């Protein structure tokens, strides 16, 4: 079966499972999208890996795996989403050590998070994309982008309820204030808030 490369399109709130997120994968050189439901922790880990400017003061679980692998010369060469059963995606890590290749079973969310840290390509089989792939219209894509930005809403540093934290609240802060809040959010390991602040700072540049 032929493999199709996937790229990360964005992260959205899951419309089907409370407290979960939908990771939207997009086929390379195609229009189909592959939505994958993941947990909040995994969504946060992937968001941090995508945001290169955020450096956690201590390694997260996936960062620890990467550091451990680097110490022993293990490389994740690619990730393959190889099976779909009852709405659950199954994935494998294709790893290499001293020219010896190993295939390791992994949850898809973990596999993608590690793929980002190893700069490894992500693939799936044509039949899986035909079965679970969708084509989003323009409004749906805008909704994904909107929800991705809202992913990082969290109240910690600002001492306010989530209902009070919105785009207008951040817009009232200066760039200097936002940078100070970003620095403190990273120090306190509040990464969801850190990504939100980073997005607002980027919009001001």
Image (spheres, rainbow, N blue to C red):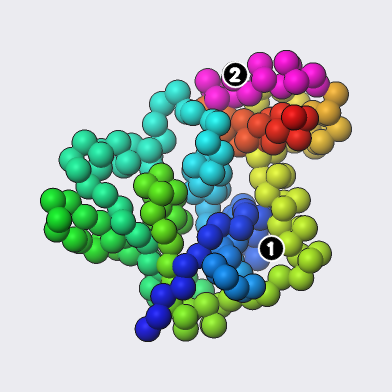
Q: Is residue 152 magenta?
A: no
Return the x and y of residue 80 as percentages of the image width and height. Answer: 38, 67
- Work out whether residue 24 can be spotted: yes
Q: Quadrant of residue 123?
A: bottom left
State the separation of the CA atoms marked 2 and 1: 32 Å
Q: Tag on residue 121?
A: none
Q: Quadrant of residue 18?
A: bottom right
Instruction: Determine crowd level at label 1: few under 14, some 14-19, many 20+ residues with C-alpha closer than 10 A.
Output: few
Q: Quadrant of residue 190?
A: top right
Task: Tell whether 108 sits left or right of 201.
Answer: left
Return the x and y of residue 28 as percentages of the image width and height. Answer: 54, 67
What predominant SS class does the magenta segment belong to?
Answer: helix
> Total of numbered circles in the picture?
2
Identity of the residue drawn at 41% across and 75% down: 3
Task: Tell whether 100 sits left or right of 29.
Answer: left
- Work out whether residue 86 can be spotted: no
Q: Is residue 27 above or below residue 129?
A: above
Q: Earlier in the sequence, mark 2 or mark 1?
A: 1
User: The magenta stretch spans which residues?
Assistant: 173-188
Identity of the residue drawn at 86% across and 32% down: 168
Residue identified by numbered label 1 = 15
Return the x and y of residue 180 as percentages of the image width and height. Answer: 66, 16
Q: Secondary structure at mark 2?
A: helix
Return the x and y of residue 79 as percentages of the image width and height. Answer: 37, 61
Residue identified by numbered label 2 = 184
Identity of the residue drawn at 32% across and 41% down: 66
Viewer-proximal residue among 140 and 96? 96
Q: Is residue 177 magenta?
A: yes
Q: Is residue 52 above or below residue 90?
A: above
Identity of the residue drawn at 47% across and 28% down: 56
Q: Secondary structure at mark 1?
A: loop
Viewer-proximal residue among 130 and 43? 130
């Amino acid at each position: 079966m032929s493999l199709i490369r996937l790229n990360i399109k964005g992260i959205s709130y899951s419309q089907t499972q409370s407290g979960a997120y939908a990771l939207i994968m997009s086929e390379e050189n195609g229009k189909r999208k592959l939505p994958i439901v993941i947990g909040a922790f995994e969504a946060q880990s992937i968001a941090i890996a995508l945001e290169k400017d955020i450096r956690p003061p201590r390694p997260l679980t996936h960062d620890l795996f990467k550091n451990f692998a680097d110490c022993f010369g293990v490389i994740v060469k690619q990730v393959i989403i190889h099976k779909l059963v009852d709405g659950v995606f199954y994935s494998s890590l294709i790893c290499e050590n001293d020219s010896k290749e190993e295939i390791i079973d992994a949850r898809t969310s973990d596999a993608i998070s590690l793929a980002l840290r190893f700069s490894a390509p992500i693939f799936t089989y044509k039949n899986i994309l035909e079965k679970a792939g969708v084509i989003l219209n323009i409004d749906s894509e805008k909704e994904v982008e909107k929800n991705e930005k809202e992913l990082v809403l969290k109240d910690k540093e600002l001492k306010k309820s989530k209902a009070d934290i919105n785009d207008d609240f951040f817009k009232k802060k200066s760039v200097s204030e936002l940078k100070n809040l970003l620095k403190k959010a990273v120090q306190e390991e509040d990464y969801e808030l850190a990504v939100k602040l980073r997005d607002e700072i980027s919009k001001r540049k």
